[in-house]
Image (cartoon, rainbow, N blue to C red):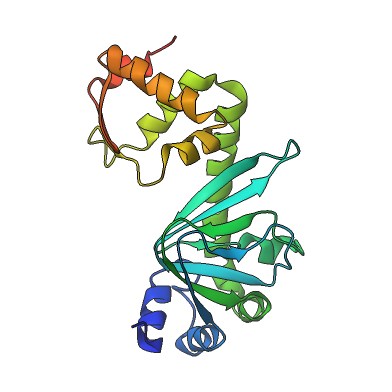
């Protein structure tokens, strides 16, 4: 069971809260609501009022939105120990631009956005650290956009595999369904599977269920249909 002491300890390890004075962190925790979601449970919907941000203790949450053609687009998969929707506090966006749905049974802390922002206003030095972290995440998003707009489907899959290795071990563990990975890469699930099979046939990777091993990094980097 998650106690208040555990809640404080978990948040203390995160960059949004690591430098908060103890009294301020206690205030944040006091205003937090814990939510347990079953797999498929909706946390918030695209267009809902954005006055809360979130910290994921366990499980997985997918952030997704419906685009102009009516299709669902995966934006990101949040994992235990990560926060999300905090950037809206600084941007002043009144509504959530995405929906959040549990991929697995999840435990989430719902945090009071305006209250947290008031705390930051009282401790401006902390804002610089947070700004640096948000800048890094923005750079990562820009890189993803470049990949989606400039690379063809094969290059997107190759780049995904190269960047998803565990500590450069050559092993990629798919912890979400392939259809969601395909959605984030901007391709159809069958296209993603077809490219994986071609990489297998080329002797570049091997696949055992959700475990992918990169057999030849040079060959992977040079792969082109």
Q: Is residue 181 above or below residue 81?
A: above
| Count of residue discs | 0
Residue situated in front as seen by the camera: 145 or 180: 180
Can you say whether 62 is above or below 130 in the image?
Answer: above
Seen at 33% across and 83% down, the residue is 1
- Residue 99 placement (x, y as % from top left): 63, 56
Query: Which of the two residues, 43 or 131, is positioned nearer the viewer here?
Result: 43
Residue lying furthest top: 225
Residue 23: x percent and y percent? 49, 90
User: From the viewer's perspective, is residue 97 above or below residue 71?
Assistant: below
Left or right of 193 on screen, residue 170: left
Residue 16: image location, x then y, percent: 50, 68
Q: In what quadrant of the picture does the C terminus appear?
A: top left
In the depicted view, which residue is nearer to us: 105 or 91? 105
Q: Is residue 132 visible?
A: no
Q: Quadrant of residue 206?
A: top left
Could you say where residue 74 lies in the image, as x and y percent from the top left?
A: 57, 44
Can see residue 8? yes
Q: Residue at 76% across / 39% down in the picture?
A: 68
- Residue 217's quadrant in the figure? top left
């Amino acid at each position: 069971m998650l106690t208040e002491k555990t809640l404080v300890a978990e948040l203390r390890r995160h960059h949004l809260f690591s430098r908060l004075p103890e009294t301020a962190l206690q205030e944040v925790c006091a205003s937090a609501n814990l939510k347990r979601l079953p797999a498929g449970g909706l946390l918030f919907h695209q267009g809902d009022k954005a006055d809360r941000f979130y910290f994921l203790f366990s499980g997985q949450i997918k952030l997704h939105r419906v685009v102009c053609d009516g299709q669902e687009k995966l934006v990101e998969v949040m994992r235990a120990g990560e926060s999300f929707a905090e950037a809206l506090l600084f941007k002043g966006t009144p509504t959530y631009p995405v929906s959040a749905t549990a991929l697995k049974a999840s435990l989430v802390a719902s945090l009071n956005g305006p209250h947290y922002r008031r705390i930051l206003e009282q401790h401006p030095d902390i804002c610089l650290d947070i700004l640096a972290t948000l800048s890094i995440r923005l750079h990562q998003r820009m890189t993803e956009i470049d990949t989606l707009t400039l690379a063809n489907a094969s290059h997107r899959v190759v780049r995904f595999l190269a960047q998803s290795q565990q500590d450069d071990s050559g092993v990629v563990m798919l912890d979400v369904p392939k259809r969601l990975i395909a959605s984030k890469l901007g391709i159809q699930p069958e296209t993603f599977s077809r490219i994986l099979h071609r990489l297998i046939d080329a002797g570049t990777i091997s696949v055992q269920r959700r475990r992918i091993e990169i057999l030849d990094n040079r060959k992977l980097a040079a792969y082109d249909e």
